[in-house]
Image (cartoon, rainbow, N blue to C red):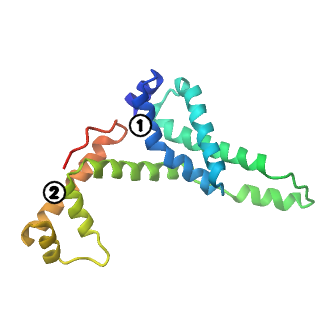
Amino acid sequence: MEELVKLARDGNQWAWGDLLRRFLPLVQLIARRHGLKGHDVEDVNQVVWLKLLQHIKSIRDTRSLPRWIATTSRNESVNVIRRSRPLVLFDDWPSFFETAHTVSYDWIEEVAAYERRRALADALDDLSSQHRELLNLLARDPPLSYVEIGRRMGMPVGSIGPTRRRVIARLQELMRGSAGSPPQQRKSA
């Protein structure tokens, strides 16, 4: 992530494109969790990326970028809601403050979950198409028999389990090794 942010600071279009690819789903998820739809989600998206463009040089710890994006997305979502809703006056201030303080959301866990999903998707992209297909067949619901998987994959039934173990080990290795690094040249299969 550090190299990617450095490249973006220097104006590298590839780096900006990769940041957008990685974090656009997070921005949209947060806006939608606030009840926004359509153009409002796009407005939040535009403002978040504009603010990142303006402030990327002030982000010292690049590991905090996902949290910065999540916080900015949340703040901008709230701003959009405020601008779009009329002011409502009411008399029950004590119950308002009671409920306002009981609502919480764990943004750190949300960002961490997003990063795990992103790392898994990137690692799956780095597997060969044959290995991705094997994992897809093994994950079917209802499950396929090894005989059926072997027939579809053109491989002996006895090699499915060991191959599965190697593919999962490789997937875990890719997830550990690619956390925060730019995507590598994708395999052609």
Task: Tell me where residue 52 sits by quadrant.
Answer: top right
Percent x, y for residue 27?
55, 46
Q: Which of the 4 image quarters holds residue 53?
A: top right
Label 2 vs label 1, nearer the camera: 1
Residue beneath the point at 26% across and 77% down: 143
Q: Give the labeled residue for mark 1.
A: 18
Q: Amino acid at mark 2?
A: Arg
Measure the C-alpha gap from mark 2 to mark 1. 29 Å
Q: Residue at x 82, y 59 (%)?
A: 96
Determine which residue is flagged by label 2: 166
Q: Is residue 173 above or below residue 92?
A: above
In the image, 57: left or right of 152?
Answer: right
Give residue 92's mark. none
Dot 2 and dot 1 residues touching (CB under 8 Å): no
Q: Secondary structure at mark 2?
A: helix
Relative to residue 96, is residue 20 drawn left or right? left
In screen coordinates, is 94 left or right of 43? right
Dot 1 crowding, Cα within 10 Å, few <14, some 14–19, many 20+:
some
Mark 2 packing: few (<14 Cα in 10 Å), some, or many (20+)?
A: few
Q: Residue at x 24, y 63 (%)?
A: 135
User: Which tag, 2 or 1, sits closer to the chain's start?
Assistant: 1
For the N terminus, which image quadrant?
Answer: top left
Where's residue 77, x and y in %? 66, 47
Residue 57 placement (x, y as % from top left): 53, 23
Is residue 177 rendered to the left or right of residue 64?
left
Residue name at image x 56 percent, y 50 percent:
28
